[in-house]
Image (spheres, grey):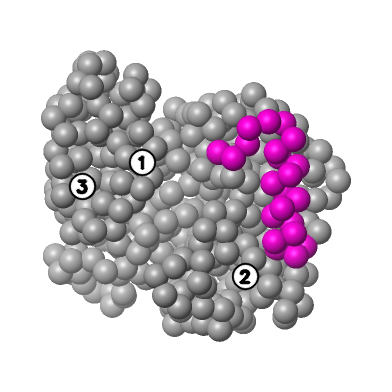
Amino acid sequence: MQYRSFPKIPNLKVSALGLGMMRLPTTDSDPTHIDEKATEELFLTALERGVNYVDTAYPYHNGASEIVTGRLINKHGLRDRLYLATKCPVWLVKGESDWDRLLSEQLAKLGTDHIDFYLLHALNAERWDTIRTYRGLEALERAKAQGRIRHIGFSFHDSLSVFKRIIDGYENWEFCQVQYNYLDTEYQAGLEGIQYAAAKDIGVIIMEPLRGGALAKVPEPVDRIFAATGKERSPADWALRFVLNRNEVVTVLSGMGSSQQVLENSIVADQVHPGQLSGPELAAYASAAAYFREKMPVPCTSCGYCMPCPNGVAIPDVFGIYNSAMAFNEREGNSRWYQKGYVSAGKGADSCIACGACLPKCPQHIDIINSLAEAHRVLTA
C-alpha cells in the first residue's frame, strides 16, 4: 500500500486508499440492518491490504455505521492500528452546548476515547453560518486540547466561492474532504478548490471518486474510449487512477461493499503515484467526461452564481441530480435522493415561484425557470 502525508501533519502517514463506511452491505432494504459478517470480512481485508484510514459519520446507515465501525475495531483490538475519522452533524446544532453533546455521543457509539480526524460534515454557506453563530470552531479547539479529537477538518458540498470562504475563515484547518472525479473536475470545490486548499497546506481527502458507483459501470462508448489507450483496466480502476494522480490528494475514500472491491481498489492505490498518467490517458478522461456531459440536459457548471434563491431552491443541486439521472440512466435512485433530500426540505424545484432573480446571474444563460420545471417533472414522474 502507498502512504501519503498531510502538509500540516508530516509525520502521520495514511493509506492512499481509505475505507468509507457509508455503503456497507445490508441484510435487507433497511440501511440500519448492516450485514456485520460481510462488513467484518471487507473491513479486515482492507486492513490486511494496508488500509489504515477508516471514515464514518453520524448519519451513515441512519446512525448504525458508527456503532458497527466501533464494534469491529474493538472486537479485533485495532484501535491503535488505524486512524478513525467521523463527522459532526452540523445541521443538528441548535446551541453552543450541542457540539460537546454530539461529540460525546459519537465517542460512545464508536467505543473510543478519541477521534483522530474530526470533520464538520457537509459544509455549505448555511452550515458555516451555524458554526460561526454557535462557536463551533472554539468548541472543537477545546475538544482537541482535551485530547478527544486529534485533527480538525471539514467535508464540503457547495460552490467554489463558499469553499474559499470557509478555507480562509479558519487558519487551523488541517484537512478538507471534497467530491472529485474525472467528471466532476469543476463541480463544487473542483480542481480549483483542491489547488486552493493545497496552496494553504491543507490536506485534501477525496470522496466520490466513482461518483457513487456510477463510474464503475460506464456505457460502451466510454469503455471504447478507455480501451483505445491500449490499457486493459476496469472502469473503477480508471476512475481511481484519475484521482490518485493528483499530488494534492492525501487519501481517496471508497465506499467498498465487498472484499473483492477492496482487493481491486487496493491494487490500484498501491500502483498509482502523482503525475504518473500519460498524455493519451489524460486525453481519454477528457473524452469520457465530454461524452457524459453531452448526455446532460442542463449545461450547469455548479458555479453557484444563481444562489441564494429567494425561495430556497437549491438550483445547482437540482440540476446536478437531474443531469446525473439522464447521463447515467439512473432515474430511480436520483429521484429518491431528490424527493427525500430536497423536495421534503423545501429546496426542490417545486418551490420555484418564477420570480426570475436567478436569470441575469447565470453565466451560462440557462433558462433556469423552465429547466427547473422539467427537472422536477422527470424526477417526480
Image vertical order of residue 97 relative to residue 51, above or below: above
The stretch of residues the image draws in magenta is 91-112
Q: Earlier in the sequence, mark 3 or mark 2?
A: 2
Residue sitting at 49 percent across and 53 percent down?
Answer: 206
Residue sitting at 52 percent across and 58 percent down?
Answer: 62
The residue wearing badge 2 is 68
User: Image check: 319 left or right of 175?
Assistant: left
User: Image check: 291 left or right of 246?
Assistant: left
Q: Label 1: how many residues lie within 10 Å, few (<14), some (14-19) or many (20+)? A: few
- Are circles 3 and 2 on residues that touch, CB within 8 Å? no
Provide residue 220's location: percent of width, then percent of height: 15, 69
Picture mark count? 3
Give the amino acid type for the residue marked by disc 1 in the picture: Ser
Quadrant for the N terminus, please.
bottom right
Provide residue 150's location: percent of width, then percent of height: 76, 50
The residue wearing badge 3 is 380
Main secondary structure along the magenta-highlighted residues? helix
Question: Considering depth in this image, is 138 or 106 the residue closer to the camera?
Answer: 106
Provide residue 160's location: percent of width, then percent of height: 43, 32
Give the amino acid type for the residue marked by disc 2 in the picture: Val
The residue wearing badge 1 is 344
